[in-house]
Amino acid sequence: MQKIKSLMARGQGLKSPQESMADMSPVENFRIPSKEELREMREQPIDPQAEQEIIDSIEEVYFSSDSFDMVQHELEKLPPDLNLQEIEDYRDKLKRQQAAVSKKVADLILEKQPSYVKELERVTSLQTNLQLAAVICTNARRQLSTSKEGFTEASLGLLANQRRRQLLTGLLKSLRTIKTLQRTDVRLSEMLEEEDYPGAIQLCLECQKAASTFKHYSCISELNSKLQDTLEQIEEQLDVALSKTCKHFDVAHYTKVQLAYTLLGKTQTAMDQLHMHFTQAIHNTVFQVVLGYVELCAGNADTKFQKMQYKDLCTHITTDSYIPCLSDLCKALWEVMLSYHRTMQWHEEQDKEEAASSPADPEGSGEEGSDEAVVGRTYVKKKLEHGLTRIWQDVQLKVKAYLLGTDMSNFKYDDFIVVLDVISRLMQVGEEFCGSRSEVLQESIKRQSVNYFKNYHRARLEELRMFLENETWELCPVKSNFSIAQLHEFKFMGQCRSPSVSPSRQANTSATTSPVEVSLFEQYLQGGNPFERQIDNKEEETEDVLASNGYESDELEKNVYQDYDSDSDVADELKQDYVDEQTGDVPVKSVSRETLRSRKRSDYNLNKAANAPILTNTTLNVIRLVGKYMQMMSILQPIAFDVIHCVSQLFDYYLYAVYTFFGRNDMYESSGLGLISSRLRTTLNRIQESLIDMEPSGESMGPPHGPPEERREKVPSPHLSQMVVLTASGTLYGLAQRVVATESLVFLAEQFDFLQSHLDTMMPAAKKPFLQQFYSQTVSTASELRKPIYWIVAARAIDYEQMLLMMAGVKWDIKEIMSQHNVYVDVLLKEFEQFNLRLAEVSRQVRIPLAVSNVLWEHCIRLANRTLVEGYANVKKCSNEGRALMQLDFQQFLTKLERLTDLRPIPDKEFVETYIKAYYLTENDMEQFIKNHREYSMKQLANLVNVCLGSHINKKARQKLLAAIDDIDRPKR
């Protein structure tokens, strides 16, 4: 049934219906339908769809396999209880299915009958052709046998001998070549000893090519293996030769190495190996340098330094060997970086040569090889460019480990500056090497610098306190043309290309001074080392700033003592801005002609150089410290703010010391003169709170004691030396020391003003407000200390109490107008004359500047005038004639006083005159006067009202005016 179904599906077959039926197994044979059945089949209507439905209703099992037993299958399907009608119905169904299949098969057989006949004809034709081919083959074999018999053995023997001869000739040539190949190893060894790597590789490659030609010989396989080993040996030696270029670059040597790698076709591999060798060279170099110093300093110690890590090894460097080791370390690293720089130069030149020669090549020749060469050059270029940053990073990490391996907080200042100088130059090398900002080096040196600077600044503050406490405040004699630029510590400011300047600032500076700047790599390309300069061989310059005596020259002494009546008598040098005698430089501060003229009588400087600055040894020391701080700041921009903050603390402490020694007095407030401005008071309070440690002195003025961390940042308040006496009237209560102290502070402030622009350029933009605030609130207040300091002298120099007692004994209720002034005026003027003489005597010790003499005279005159007002306010009774006598006394005082001083106008002149004239005011005017003149005390105003009682003010008006005075005084209580 399966064959039938397959035949029905394919719709084709080659056998006749009879043959097809004969091929079926007995089980599968169809029974020939009877005539009756055929008739029934013909009688049945032919409906293809119905016929197809009958065929589809046949069970699948009938199509399963050839061995299927349909009878057994149908019998097994019978139910246990047989029903004749059902069996007959089922039999009819099977008959219909059989009839449909038989009809379908018969139709297919009839349909394929023409194809069967045609195929049978083709088979018959094929059989005829095969018989003809068999005949042709038989004839051919017979003819071949005849041809074979026609040839003789002699002719074939000749051909065989000729062929053998040709083979032996070729063999002889091959044997000679093999013999030559076996002797090439000796030549290769000689070429390697001569470092002719390109020639050795060329020879080896040719031998390998020849060996591949004769690889069919057994001896060649062994020779080929030997050549391969030799080539590997050449590559190893080539790698060693490549590593040598990392420390000492040689153009000829490197050219041979690169040519050899080109022959091997491994230029990219060579570049990878080169970078690995540079990295290894950096590690080995620094390790060997540091190891050498560690072993040298350790002596016979048994410590196994060889097995230590580099970072641990750096911690064993001693302080004495730190700088030499750092210098040698940088020298060695410079050699490595210089070799890399020269390597890049070599490749750049090669690229230029190849680019120049490439247009000359014929069109289309070697196009593929040219593309490969371009790709190789591009790879090498990128690899070298990327290697710059990588190598510099390795250098930074090695130097960082060395820097942080030692605590430099106890280094000497000069030694630390040398370290900064070396690192600064190394950062300059890095900037020129790969354009790096050297963040790793900057961070590590910043950490060390902050640590070092905190300890250094703390020690300098303690040192400054010791200097101040031992300072006798005597004049330090310096030349009139003294300038801080003459000090060693400020030499770096005048150098256009100093190694102490940071790389970025050096670039900016030199860019403005010279159009073409030679880089370090160009400068030391042929030899030398930027780190070779000897640190100890600094310029030994002598500072010529101290004056040998009071005069710098006989000419100046002559000019000083000349008559002051005309400008023609003043030396030309003094008319102009004074000039440095050696350099011709004009210092910052100059003296105007008007100032010189005004000094003729007011400036007590006849025995000193006209413009010599007033300063002490401590002042000079502070200035030097500022120079050192600025030098460190110029090298290390990242800690510029910390350094400037410390610089401000130096000035703060000096200012606070001068105030504490000479200006602190409880009588300021009671004087009513406003001696300490609010700005100065705020500055002093700020210094005391932030910088002064009040615990040692036990003072209670400051805030509560802070934590230990805060106290470590503070300095104890200084104490005046016992050798300085400020209570002797003969010395005007230490006026000479007060002048030296105060004017040295003013001079220091002037130097800070001079340095402001330089400090501003180094200060980070975000921190510049701090610098501006420091200058506006602290530096500018230095001259304000003159008032409180010199007020103490003025308050004691003249006996104001005696004057009050003498004024109390004068009778003011006189009836006649007097033409003679009172005696107390002469006594007061005598006191001023004595003060003038003592002032001149003090000026023999120290020059008293015009500003100082003006402040002294102003204080004395103010105190005298206020004493006069106080004396007039103590009067119980006074007449109009008495008031006229007061005016006469005061005018006499002013007339004589103006002969003693050039100070104009006379201070507080209106203060006295207004008070005297107030006696004549009416009731309404007096009330307005009381409201407008708050400068007078309540006692003085009340006395003015009481004295006027009875003359032109009645009791009712008196009560009203006293009530107005009380209203004014009430808010103050």
Image: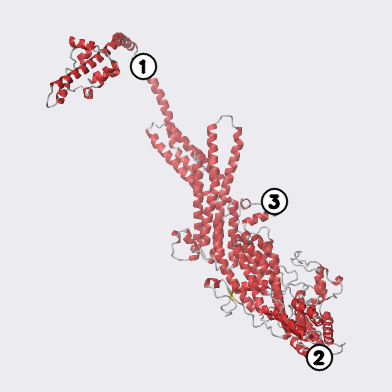
Residue under pointer 2: 811
* Distance from Cα at disc 2 to Cα at disc 1: 176 Å
- Please name the residue shown 67% across and 74% down the image: 617
Could you tell me residue 321's position as x and y percent?
A: 54, 64
Query: Disc 1 marks which amino acid?
Result: Leu
Q: Nearer the viewer, residue 830 or 917?
A: 917
Q: Which residue is situated farthest in the front direction here?
A: 956
**Residue to which mark 1 is pinned:** 156
Residue 748, visible in the rendered structure: no
Q: Earlier in the sequence, mark 1 or mark 3?
A: 1
The 10 Å Cα crowd at callout 1, few under 14, some 14 to 19, many 20 or more, is few
- Circle 1 — which element? helix
Camera-side residue: 781 or 954?
Answer: 954
Spatial distance from mark 3 to mark 2, Cα to Cα? Answer: 87 Å
Name the front one of labels 2 and 1.
Answer: 2
Mark nearer the N terminus (3 vs 2): 3
Q: Given this view, does label 3 or label 2 mark the residue nearer the observer?
A: 2
Q: Amino acid at mark 2?
A: Lys
Q: Is residue 565 left or right of residue 439?
A: right
Callout 3: SS: loop
User: Which of 413 and 262 lies nearest the eye of the viewer?
Assistant: 413
Q: Are marks 2 and 1 in contact (CB under 8 Å)?
A: no
Q: Which quadrant is home to the C terminus?
A: bottom right
Image x and y of residue 248, in percent: 55, 50
Residue 128 against residue 157 in the figure, above or below: above
Q: What mark, if any, has residue 515 been given in the picture?
A: 3
